[in-house]
Image (cartoon, helix red, strand yellow):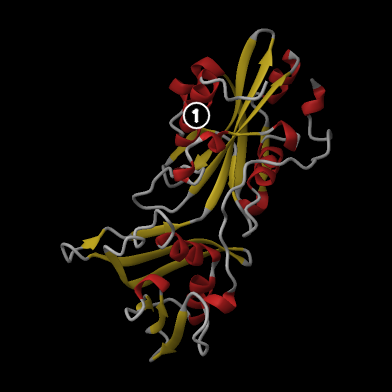
């Protein structure tokens, strides 16, 4: 129905299962003089290319962690990196219930900040190398990190004349060297952990249709609590954690026709997007997108076990 078009229904509040998004203040993280707070830290520099910073983690007091800037990294970039929510959340994850430092069999000794990419005034991507030592063997655990933080993706299923279609985007993905057919997705812009709100905004920006918040189903909420209700597409090198959502609706066939091949763009982000509509039953064989394949798997299992709202 035409109610799916951009100009339609306003967003309304909807209570989803709680996600544990941890944040703590800069004052706590950069506590240089007081002995209180979860970290103790000290910054110094012998030259513009040898910036360093020292912190103490609660779980390994007496074993300070040295944070060093790679040559060529400016003072401002170094400060932005270590003060960022990306880096603070990574440190918090290390000592979480399932964190690699939780049982004290491993120790973080050194972090090399290698690169910072800014998205306007906010940090977008952070690259660093962490030395985590296995106490039993004395060897380093692989620790090269590309940090980009939490993100969301939406599986949109529209039924029309007895056929269910999935709505996707196709755009140039330079890291792969290819155009990729994938779910509409995006990074969270702040520390508030608004997964469902971000999901709705990304669909509107990338597809041009407006979804009601109360119609969104959090697929990752069906996972076991030990997962933190998130999925990691590439945990060997990236911290990205995904919240996967589902939207189901019924539309007239002319809406499917209007969506297929529609071109949208977000000039400020350099995104040139083409909307694609694919029969859902064929989607799992047509996309290389991990987000789509994970969403399909959780959706099908949740449907099989009768967990989806009617």
Would you name the residue on which mark 1 appears?
Answer: 298
On the image, the x and y values in percent for residue 132 come to 29, 65
The reply to whether residue 191 is visible in this rendering is yes
Compared to 186, does 244 lie above or below? above
Query: Residue at left 58%, top 64%?
Result: 23
The reply to whether residue 211 is visible in this rendering is no
Compared to 149, does 290 lie above or below? above
User: What secondary structure is found at the residue carrying circle 1?
Assistant: helix
Give the quadrant of residue 243: top right
Query: Residue at left 41%, top 57%?
Result: 146
On the image, the x and y values in percent for residue 268 come to 66, 54
Of the 4 image quadrants, the one containing the C terminus is: top right
Pick the front one: 244 or 34: 34
On the image, the x and y values in percent for residue 22 come to 56, 60
Query: Residue at left 79%, top 30%?
Result: 5
Pick the front one: 76 or 16: 16
Compared to 111, does 301 lie above or below? above
What is the residue that sits farthest to the left in this orientation? Answer: 137
Query: Residue at left 41%, top 89%?
Result: 45
On the image, the x and y values in percent for residue 269 come to 62, 52
Pick the front one: 191 or 229: 229
Pick the front one: 19 or 239: 19
Give the quadrant of residue 147: bottom left
| Disc 1 packing (10 Å; few <14; some 14–19; many ≥20) | some
């Amino acid at each position: 129905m035409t109610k799916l078009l951009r100009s339609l229904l306003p967003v309304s509040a909807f209570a989803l299962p709680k996600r544990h998004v941890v944040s703590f203040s800069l004052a706590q993280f950069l506590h240089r003089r007081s002995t209180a707070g979860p970290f103790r830290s000290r910054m110094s520099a012998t030259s513009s290319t040898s910036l360093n910073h020292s912190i103490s983690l609660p779980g390994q007091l007496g074993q300070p962690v040295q944070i060093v800037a790679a040559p060529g990294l400016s003072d401002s970039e170094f400060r932005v990196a270590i003060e960022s929510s990306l880096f603070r959340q990574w440190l918090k994850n290390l000592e979480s219930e399932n964190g690699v430092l939780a049982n004290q069999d491993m120790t973080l000794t050194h972090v090399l900040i290698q690169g910072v990419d800014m998205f306007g005034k906010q940090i977008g991507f952070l690259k660093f190398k962490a030395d985590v030592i296995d106490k039993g063997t004395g060897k380093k655990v692989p620790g090269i990190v590309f940090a980009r933080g939490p993100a969301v993706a939406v599986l949109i299923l529209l039924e029309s004349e007895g056929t269910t279609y999935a709505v996707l985007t196709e755009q140039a993905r330079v890291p792969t060297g290819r155009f990729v057919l994938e779910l509409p997705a995006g990074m969270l812009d702040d520390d508030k952990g608004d997964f469902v709100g971000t999901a709705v905004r990304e669909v509107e920006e990338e597809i041009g249709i407006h979804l009601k918040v109360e119609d969104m189903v959090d697929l990752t909420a069906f996972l076991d609590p030990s997962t933190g209700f998130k999925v990691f597409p590439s945990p060997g090198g990236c911290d990205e954690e995904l919240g996967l959502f589902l939207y189901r609706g019924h539309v007239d066939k002319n809406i499917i026709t209007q969506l297929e091949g529609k071109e949208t763009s977000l000039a400020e982000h350099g995104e040139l997007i083409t909307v694609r509509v694919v029969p859902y039953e064929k989607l799992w064989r047509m996309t290389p997108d991990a987000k789509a394949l994970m969403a399909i798997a959780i959706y099908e299992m949740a449907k099989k076990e009768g967990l989806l709202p009617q």
